[in-house]
Image: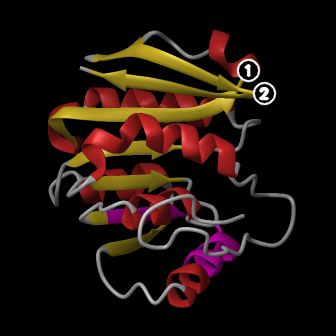
Amino acid sequence: MRVIGGTYRSRRLAAPRGMATRPTSDRLRETLFNVLAPGIVDAVFADLFAGSGAVGIEALSRGARLVYFVDQAPAAIAAIRINLAALDIKSGFRIETGSVFAVLKRLAPAERCTIVFLDPPYAAAADYARTLEHIGNHADDLLTPDGIVVAEHSRQMQETLAEAYGPLRRYRVLAHGDARLSFYRR
């Protein structure tokens, strides 16, 4: 696994040990950031269920002003710290440990996000709906007016994700192998 573009391009990243984390593939991250490119510079980016932090690090590499790395697994938090240290990234990020829902409540008064990326374990279908519902119900507090929410999920999950969560409407789906990216905005 490596950084695809930007300042840290081609640098290798570590993944948490074990099978609990499924890192976003290099090719899917490349697709994601090709779509997000016009809005990534100076963005506030939330990497929910961050795992290795590869998606958030990609955002920093491409010019995001601030990235929130959110995960509750100790192995994931350790991998994020290792990757940031290996790249000598010392600012422009906050590591938030705990459940995504508790962290989202803390983030709401802090700074609204331009882009929120979520990638729970594919088997955790309830986490997708709960997270998207929470963001949709608190969109005014969590997102900038032009904010985007992107969910990475399996092909099978596409049918179970709703077209809308509060004011958020799905406007695009991109496929790459078994993985899908669903894009939501107001």
- State yes or no: residue 68 in magenta: yes
Dividing the image into 4 quarters, which one contains the N terminus? bottom right
Residue 64: give x, y in percent of width and height.
29, 60
| Viewer-proximal residue among 1 and 47 | 1
Upstream in sequence: badge 2 or badge 1: 1
Q: Which span is picked out in magenta?
A: 67-80
Residue designated by label 2: 178
| Viewer-proximal residue among 160 and 53 | 53
Query: Going by the image, does 176 lie left or right of 46?
Result: right
Q: Are marks 2 and 1 in contact (CB under 8 Å)?
A: yes
Residue 142 image label: none
Residue 132: give x, y in percent of width and height.
43, 30
Query: Going by the image, does 147 lie left or right of 24?
Result: left
What residue is drawn where x is 35% and y is 63%?
A: 67
Residue 155 image label: 1
The relative height of residue 132 versus residue 96 in the rendered view (above or below) is: above
What residue is drawn where x is 36% and y is 88%?
A: 90
Q: Give the class, few, some or many, for how many residues have Cα within 10 Å of label 1's Cα (few <14, many ≥20).
A: some
The relative height of residue 166 versus residue 53 in the rendered view (above or below) is: above
Query: Quarter-wise, where is residue 152 in the image?
Result: top right
Disc 2 is placed on an element classified as loop
